[in-house]
Amino acid sequence: MILSDRVHTFGQAMISRYGERVHKIAIDAGFTCPNRDGSKGRKGCTFCNNTSFSPNGRRPPSLPMQIKMGRQVIYRRTRARKYLAYFQAYTNTYANVKTLQALYDEALKIPDIIGIAVGTRPDCVPKAVLNLLSDYQQQGHEVWLELGLQSSFDNTLEAVNRGHTYADYITAMYHAHQRGLQVCTHLIVGLPGETKQHIQITLDRVLELGVAGLKLHPLHVVKGTQLANQWRHGNYTPWTQQQYVDTAADLIEMTPEHIFYHRVTATANKGSLLAPTWCQHKWRVLNNIEKELRLRNSSQGKTYYQAPDRLRKGK
Ligand code: SF4
């Protein structure tokens, strides 16, 4: 059995839309983040590795080179012939709009790059940037705005030093919807002080506002983070794999079928991951999520129809 039999995966959605595989090529375009450079804060999120922000620590290759290298790896594995340039590292809207346009244009002029996915924070999407993304979409490119919300609870966002609020997300979504943009919202499962109920409420809120895609991510404790210190001192306990799998299955069941899951788990670099160690084995976790759904005789959307009326509006 495969996960896409039970989950509306981004991969399957792209095959339906384009008749062939479309894969994202992850790019580090050399951005920083307002939660690091002092504009919002200097410490960054407690789970974010700060060594990568050292001035000499990061010199990414040119954008065409990154695309070439990413394409080679993905092509060998999948034979895909169409790609999205995924501006993934840090805050990829954190520059003036002319700079952003030059960067996105550089990617989009490569023939097999049919679109872009832009990862950013909810407090860093000015209208001019949304207009630019909307223009690309209207030109026929596949465009995704990937918003890192992580939690809808302001006390959690404060505890992990996100430097933005849930209200910022509501505002960003309002302006993205006005422009018909596809948004993929990122959520973290297992944030300090949160239970399964918290992430379920966060998903309810995200669904109520409307979203086209979702990413689920277990919280990783990686070296060089404030979270690593909390974990060492016993002030943070990572979730077990079973807790994560059970919760991911619940969230998938709660999600209406038309929403694409871009990701239902994530792995961390083996050299930097401290805990939980099961996060090293992405495929095992994916298989276990599929198995959990199979044991429940369930799939995406199964419990959506039991959700409060407000969640069914607009369906
Ligand atoms: S996790 Fe993202 S938003 Fe937080 S400090 Fe790191 S780059 Fe910035």
Image (tube, rainbow, N blue to C red):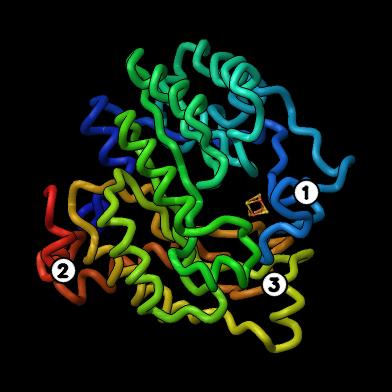
What x and y, as percent, mark residue 273? 68, 66
Q: Reading the chain from its start, which is encountered first: label 3 or label 1?
A: 1
Q: Nearer the viewer, residue 87 or 26?
A: 87
Residue 311, picture quadrant: bottom left
Q: Reading the chain from its start, which is encountered first: label 2 or label 3?
A: 3
Say few, some or many: other residues with alpha carbon within 10 Å of mark 1 (under 14 / 14 to 19 / 20 or more). Answer: few
Is any part of residue 279 visible from this angle? no
Q: Identity of the amino acid at label 2?
A: Ala
What separation in Å lies between label 1 and label 2 (alpha carbons)?
Answer: 41 Å
Q: Identity of the amino acid at label 3?
A: Leu
Q: Reading the chain from its start, which is encountered first: label 1 or label 2?
A: 1
* Secondary structure found at label 1: loop
Residue indicated by mark 2: 307
What x and y, as percent, mark residue 276? 59, 75
Q: Nearer the viewer, residue 148 or 260?
A: 148
Q: Quadrant of the N terminus?
A: bottom left
- Marks 2 and 3 in Cβ contact (< 8 Å): no
| 223 in relation to 71, above or below | below
Q: Nearer the viewer, residue 202 or 234?
A: 202
At a point 16% along the width and 61% down the height, the residue shown is 310
Residue indicated by mark 3: 227
Closest to the camera, between mark 1 and mark 2, is 1
Residue indicated by mark 1: 38
As drawn, which residue projects farthest toward the bottom? 234
Residue 240 is left or right of residue 57, and the answer is left
What separation in Å lies between label 2 and label 3 (alpha carbons)?
Answer: 34 Å
Residue 10, picture quadrant: top left
As drawn, which residue projects farthest toward the right? 56
